[in-house]
Amino acid sequence: MTQGPHAAAVRAVGTTEERTFGPSGWIKGTAATLFGELGNLLAGFFKLFTKPKALLFTVAISALWIWLNHMRLLEGLEGVTDILSKITYAGGGTNGSVIQIIGGTLGKGIVGAGLCSILYGGIGKMIRGIGNIFTEPGFHVGAAILGFGCAALAYQFTAGFAGAGGFMVGVAGAMMAFEALSMREGFLVNLAASFSSRKVTNGRTTGKRLLPGRYKGFLTGAALGFAAWAVLCGTGIMDDLALDVWGFVWDTVSLDVPEGLVPYLLPAAFILVGLILNAFGRGKQTEGGTAA
């Protein structure tokens, strides 16, 4: 791609009205992105069989996961084997409830995608993305809070139950969020765009233009969310926070929230606040030097 994430994307829709997307527009756009990415995921699976490098990596990492889990279950993990297991999140999706198995499997996919991206220059893209935080104009706090909450929720579902053994999910998630700041393709890029676009008119046509401050804010917040939740879950701090949140909810509204849902309340609160700020542009946020 030759254009940066802040370039205008023109799409005719038959109206000359200029307006900012409201909450309903963001919900529709995000739903379309999620379903679209599901199709891309399935298509990507079949493309593995036409791209030898991707297929070779998938076979290799899968074989490594199987071997590490075999060692963990039969002989116990020690030394190098233990380190490799944690770095590759080999235990993801191998135990717990059905929901935890699904979440752990998805977390293993995040780690696999992160490791694969390293082979294709991911470190360089991540460094450029971090640099864009300081060089690109504008930063929207509401979008950053929204991104933080989305990443925290994703980490909690995929690796929150794994404790210190799931830290690599946070590392991989943060790395890919930073990478997205220097790219214009991929799931995180499309998701960030769904929260950071507005309609603009040019003559008789209307198109979508990315708002730089919101785009950068969402992805920066997502990177911080993955990293922060990995630390909170890995150190056990989240367990204490969950008890405090449960006590607050019980004392405030006398609602007995199921124990397994309590750790999701904090990310949900961040998402709610972020949606409100992102929708109405409140606070000290800028869009490339222009008030949001």
Image (tube, rainbow, N blue to C red):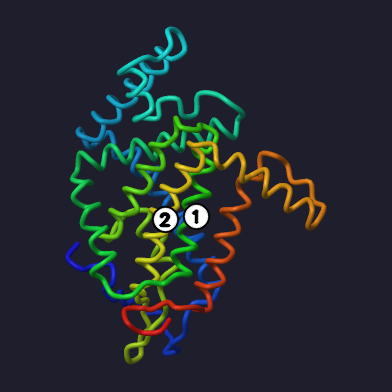
- Would you say the residues marked 1 and 2 are in contact, meaning their CB atoms lie under 8 Å apart? yes
Residue at x-position 32% and y-position 21%:
64
Specify the amino acid type for callout 2.
Ala
- 287 left or right, relative to 116: right
Mark 2 surroundings within 10 Å by alpha-carbon count, few (fewer than 14), some (14 through 19), many (20 or more): many
Q: Earlier in the sequence, mark 1 or mark 2?
A: 1
Where is residue 36? Give x, y as percent: 43, 55
Q: Which mark is residue 222?
A: 2
Q: Quadrant of the C terminus?
A: bottom left
Q: Is residue 256 above or below residue 88?
A: below
Image coordinates of residue 41 in percent, x first then y, are 39, 45
In the displayed image of the protein, which residue is found farthest to the right?
Answer: 254
Residue occupying image coordinates x 44% and y 70%: 141
> How many marks on residues?
2
Q: Is residue 185 left or right of residue 225?
A: left
Q: Nearer the viewer, residue 125 or 131?
A: 131
**Residue situated in front as seen by the camera: 119 or 123:** 123
Going 78% across and 50% down the picture, which residue do you hit?
250
Vertical order, 289 against 84 (above or below)? below
How many other residues sit within 10 Å of disc 1, few (<14), some (14-19) or many (≥20)? Answer: many
> x and y percent of residue 248 in the render?
73, 53
Q: Secondary structure at mark 2?
A: helix
- Identify which amino acid the numbered label 1 is placed on: Cys
| The image quarter in which residue 47 lies | top left
Q: Residue furthest bottom?
A: 203
Q: Quadrant of the N terminus?
A: bottom left
Disc 1: which residue:
150
